[in-house]
Image: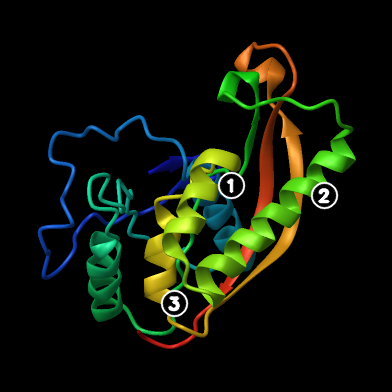
Amino acid sequence: MKTPFGDLAVSTEVGNQPPEIRRDLADLLKDEFSLDTFFGMLRLAADLDHIEPLHVTPFYIGMTRNPVTGSFEIARAVARWLLDQWDDETAIVTTGDVVHYGTVYGSEVADAALEQLESQFRHQLEALLGMAFRDRQMEEAYQIAQCKLKSDQREILPLLVYLLGEKAVANIEVFALSDYANILETAPPCLVSSALIAYKHGGAE
């Protein structure tokens, strides 16, 4: 994997591969860029500390909620597999915007200042994380993530809930909204979250 700071070794080999995990033999994800910034930061950090970069195995998460039955069994099965593969020292990093807001995303746009929107969406995100991790209300959390926050992480969320266990904690360390109107060449508002969320393992489920 090429980064601005040099190459980074990325493994695609997985052991005991269940049917829920598939290798990208057709190279469908060759242009996927969601991990580019993370890979670059990892390469840079290793160089600054004069150490070899950490071993990375990327996974791309598809649908974890059955659209017909509403079941999250796929998320549970993948979580069980991940727990079997890795030990407690493994770090799991997820990428994807947790909030999208604007007419380009199909939002009902309100006349509100940026600070008000940031406070509103952070509050909704905190409530969502509590609903998912503390209350285990998976369906309700999924629907809020999909319909209200328009979150890229709606499919990852159920997997994290099962992976991290009943006493898992999700803390929002940083939250802000970034203006993407010029990037996407669309009329404002076009806001995307810039967030850092720390997840603490609660014990295997």
Decide which of 197, 7 is in the foreground and name it: 197
Q: Earlier in the sequence, mark 2 or mark 1?
A: 1
Left or right: 181 as drawn, with respect to 144:
right
Task: Measuring from the top left, give residue 174's x and y in whole percent.
Answer: 75, 57
Query: Where is residue 27, by image quadrant?
Result: top left
Q: Earlier in the sequence, mark 3 or mark 2?
A: 2
Task: Measuring from the top left, give residue 141's x and y in whole percent.
Answer: 51, 57
Circle number at residue 18: none
Please tell me whether mark 3 or mark 2 is closer to you in this view: 2
Identify the residue at horizontal 89%, vertical 33% (top origin).
113
Residue 150, placed above or below residue 9: above
Instruction: Tell me the crowding category of disc 2: few under 14, some 14 to 19, or many 20 or more residues within 10 angstroms, Cα based.
Output: some
Residue 119, placed above or below residue 201: above
Which amino acid is tagged 1?
Val
- Label 2: which residue? 119
Image quarter (top left, top right, bottom left or bottom right) of the N terminus: top left
Question: How far, Cα to Cα, is label 3 from label 2?
Answer: 27 Å
Identify the residue at horizontal 54%, vertical 49% (top origin).
144
Q: Earlier in the sequence, mark 1 or mark 3?
A: 1
Which amino acid is tagged 2?
Ser
Secondary structure beneath dot 3 equals helix
- Label 1: which residue? 98
Decide which of 201, 8 is in the foreground and name it: 201
Left or right: 160 as drawn, with respect to 17:
right
Task: Measuring from the top left, give residue 197's x and y in whole percent.
Answer: 63, 62
Instruction: Tell me the crowding category of disc 3: few under 14, some 14 to 19, or many 20 or more residues within 10 angstroms, Cα based.
Output: many
Which amino acid is tagged 3?
Leu
